[in-house]
Image: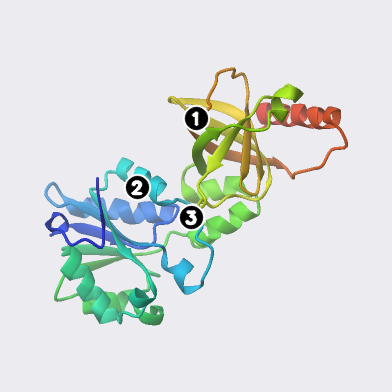
Amino acid sequence: MKVFINKKTSFTSDSVCAIGGFDGIHRGHLEIIKHAKKLTGSRKKLGIITFIPLPIFVLKRLKTLYLTPKEEKEEILRDLGIDFIYYFKFNKSFSQLNPADFVKLVYSEIAPSIVIVGENFRFGKDRKGTVMMFKELAKDYFSVEIIADIEDEGTISSTRIRELLLLGNIKAANHLLGREYSISGRVIKGRGKGTKLGFPTINIRVQEEKFLPLDGIYKVKTIYDKKELLGAMFCYHNLIEIYIINFSGNLYQKEVKIKLLKRIRDIEKFPDDDSLRTAIARDVEKVKKEA
């Protein structure tokens, strides 16, 4: 899979593209990609047109936190068989493009033959461009197909998934994603407190741009060397520690992936180490037993 950032290239010419934010690559995004694949045939390339950073972070001046940061997004899309990703750099100047100029830019830079969008796609200055406007403006350049949003007790969206993660409702978030929400990072040296308590943990350095769930204790799987190991995760702001059940190896400086399965409880303060040890043992038993 090739990646282009504001770089005109013939590689993307006559391609089938899906356009949007694609943060999280949830079930709604997967439906758009599935439809795009049907249109590629055996000759056309399949591409994703997206933005870096996402418009919401620039327009609303929000802290840049992704469900799927750039590398994670690219890994998922590569596994889905995407041929290329084209990023437009999104800044204030780009946000001022009128709808017609945006469509011309897509054609001049990427030259797709077909573009697929979700029904709530908005574009151009003040997000005034609708999908029907997009289709009308593009008729002399490329064809546009509009895919209805996927409903599951409401529209599936990245915003809704974020809200569920902030509530600690991992099962519901995973259901909308179509897979377990994951956190990847390098194992770093910790304080060694878990080892003293009889529950040695690994500490993970998480990307600053990764969206983390509500603080708490979670049932997780740690993925390393193609193995999935059950464990209990402590999440407090950007501090991530995992006790891996029935594991005695050394993962220091290794890259691991953590799949979130269920939230067990809130963070608590304990009066002494014995109380903390008892609580961890109870958490581990819950992780082993709870579905």
Which one is nearer the viewer's eye here, 152 or 282?
A: 282
Q: What residue do we see at 17% from left, 75% from top? A: 139
The alpha-carbon separation of the residues under discs 3 and 1 comes to 24 Å
Q: Residues within 10 Å of mark 3 (few under 14, many from 20)?
A: many
Q: Quadrant of residue 140?
A: bottom left
Pointer 1 and pointer 2: residues touching (CB < 8 Å)? Answer: no
Q: What residue do we see at 56% from left, 33% from top? A: 188
Tell me the residue that label 3 is attached to.
Answer: 66
Can the viewer see residue 291? no
Which one is nearer the viewer's eye here, 280 or 29?
A: 280
Residue 125 located left or right of residue 220:
left
* Marked residue nearer the N-terminal end (3 or 1): 3
Closest to the camera, between mark 3 and mark 1, is: 1
Q: What residue do we see at 25% from left, 81% from top? A: 100
Image mark count: 3
The alpha-carbon separation of the residues under discs 1 and 2 comes to 23 Å
Amino acid carrying mark 1 in the image: Gln
Q: Where does the image place residue 238, in percent across and percent down from the top left?
A: 61, 47
